[in-house]
Amino acid sequence: MFWRIALFLLSQLAPALAIWFLYAGVHREALALLAALVGCHVWLALDSMRGWRLLKWLRSGDTTQIPLGSGYWGEVFDRARKLVRSRDRVLAESDKRLQEFLAAMQASPNGVVLLDREGRIEWFNQTAAGHFGLDASRDLLQHLGNLVRDPGFAAYFSTRDFKKDVVMPGRNSTSSKPVRLSVHMHPYGEGRSLMLSHDITALDQAEAMRRDFVANVSHEIRTPLTVLAGFVETLQSLPLKEVERMRYLGLMEQQAQRMQTLVSDLLTLSRLEGSPLPPAQEWHAAALLMAQCEQDAHDLSTLLWSDPQGLSFQTDGVMEIAGSASELLSAMFNLIGNAIRYSPPDKPISVRWSRLPHGGAVFSVRDQGTGIAPEHIPRLTERFYRVDRSRSRETGGTGLGLAIVKHVAQRHGAELSIESAPGQGSCFSISFPPQRVRVRADALGADTAPQAAAALIGA
Ligand SMILES: Nc1ncnc2c1ncn2[C@@H]1O[C@H](COP(=O)(O)OP(=O)(O)OP(=O)(O)O)[C@@H](O)[C@H]1O
Ligand SMILES: [Mg+2]
């Protein structure tokens, strides 16, 4: 400021003194005064010019083209520039924060929609776009009520009672593939709202499955229990002959056995779901597993049919399977048991363990029994699913066998496939990946060693 006043005085004094000392004629004082006045105006013009440049720069808003200057205005320029720069930095920083925040909301698995006071859409993430079919180039600043037209949501949105959420169908919901959304509004700021949407289809399905499961289990247990209770009542109230009493007790035993099978299958399933994966280093000879099933299969066939089916068992080479022996046996016997139960006694059943060209192995059970219609095949591995409930009950089936087989297969990295046609029989097979299968040459006798070596080369 000192220099500014000094310069101002100098701009007047310098021309006045110059006239004073250089000119000695008439009107010397008046001319000196005029020179001081001219100096003052020149200073004022130059000063205004620099002030105007600053104003022009500030008005332009272009912070990159910074006018340089010295002295008083130079300092004003400098300080204004620093202020503008620090404001730019703060703006850039808050913009970065905003972008990071929006990116986090974008990454959210929930749908997020920001609404202004009038309920117009200010921003939404990709998940919300998918849930409600929104398009950023079309729907921003549109009223949400005009875009989401579900009646349940419309009522929720208009009453503005946002204490609870509302459940509505998703945009891509169809009767065969329903999508359920839970939507909740959260008011914030001055009249604004944050809308969160959450896909609850899987939860709904899990809940429905749980309900079905409980209903199925109760139903399956209720039937033998009712029969048992009936027999108990008969035994208590009627004087029966020894033969009749023994017959009733036999029937009661059957029902008790059925409940026992059901409980044991349920326990197997829950064990399969909760236990760690079967070990990949525990090897079991396929022939040994087969031998165990063979005996049980003959027993079952003899029990069910007075004239047992022709059962053939075949195991290729000396093959070993990695995994849990008890799980493998349970899956194998479930398939063999089904073939025995759902085939008439005069139809043969063939059970095989064979190697696949890529090194894996397949366990297959082929029968020429009743066969299964194509519409039932995709549902066979559902719990309690039976093609013919009454027939299955007659044969003691609970509908859990194939669910167990599928679980066991999955846990061993294997795949269950079903080929069947009504009246022509069925083939159920479990294909194991190469890492679960090996052939051990040292386990063979001398006569079979070349066979194993060939199998190894094949792998
Ligand atoms: N080999 C087969 N031939 C014809 N139908 C079959 C065969 N295997 C299974 N099914 C059908 O698939 C249904 C489901 O089989 P699954 O093994 O899961 O149950 P289940 O045999 O009824 O009872 P369990 O739990 O005792 O095995 C059976 O009820 C039967 O209708
Ligand atoms: Mg079965």
Image: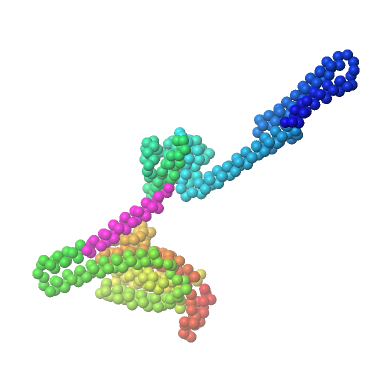
The residue lying toward the viewer, choosing from 96 and 272, is 96
Based on the picture, tell me whether residue 26 belongs to the magenta stretch.
no
Counting from the top left corner in percent of width and height, residue 55 is at 68, 29
Say how many tags the image has: 0
- Which span is picked out in magenta? 198-225
The answer to which image quadrant residue 430 occupies is bottom left
Based on the picture, tell me whether residue 224 belongs to the magenta stretch.
yes
Query: In the picture shown, does residue 146 fall above or below 245?
Result: above
| Residue name at image x 23 percent, y 67 percent | 255
The residue lying toward the viewer, choosing from 343 and 268, is 268
The residue lying toward the viewer, choosing from 257 and 453, is 257
The quadrant of the image that shows the N terminus is top right
The overriding secondary structure of the stretch rendered in magenta is: helix
| Residue name at image x 52 percent, y 74 percent | 458
Residue that extends furthest to the top in the rendered view of this protein: 26
Residue that extends furthest to the left in the rendered view of this protein: 239
Judge whether residue 223 can be spotted in this image: yes
Counting from the top left corner in percent of width and height, residue 289 is at 39, 76
Q: Would you say 166 lies left or right of 123 here?
A: left
Q: Which colour scheme is used?
A: rainbow
| Residue name at image x 9 percent, y 69 percent | 239
| Residue name at image x 37 percent, y 38 percent | 161
Counting from the top left corner in percent of width and height, residue 445 is at 46, 85
Residue that extends furthest to the bottom in the rendered view of this protein: 446
Judge whether residue 332 can be spotted in this image: no
Counting from the top left corner in percent of width and height, residue 117 is at 46, 34
Query: In the picture shown, does residue 392 fall above or below 311?
Result: above
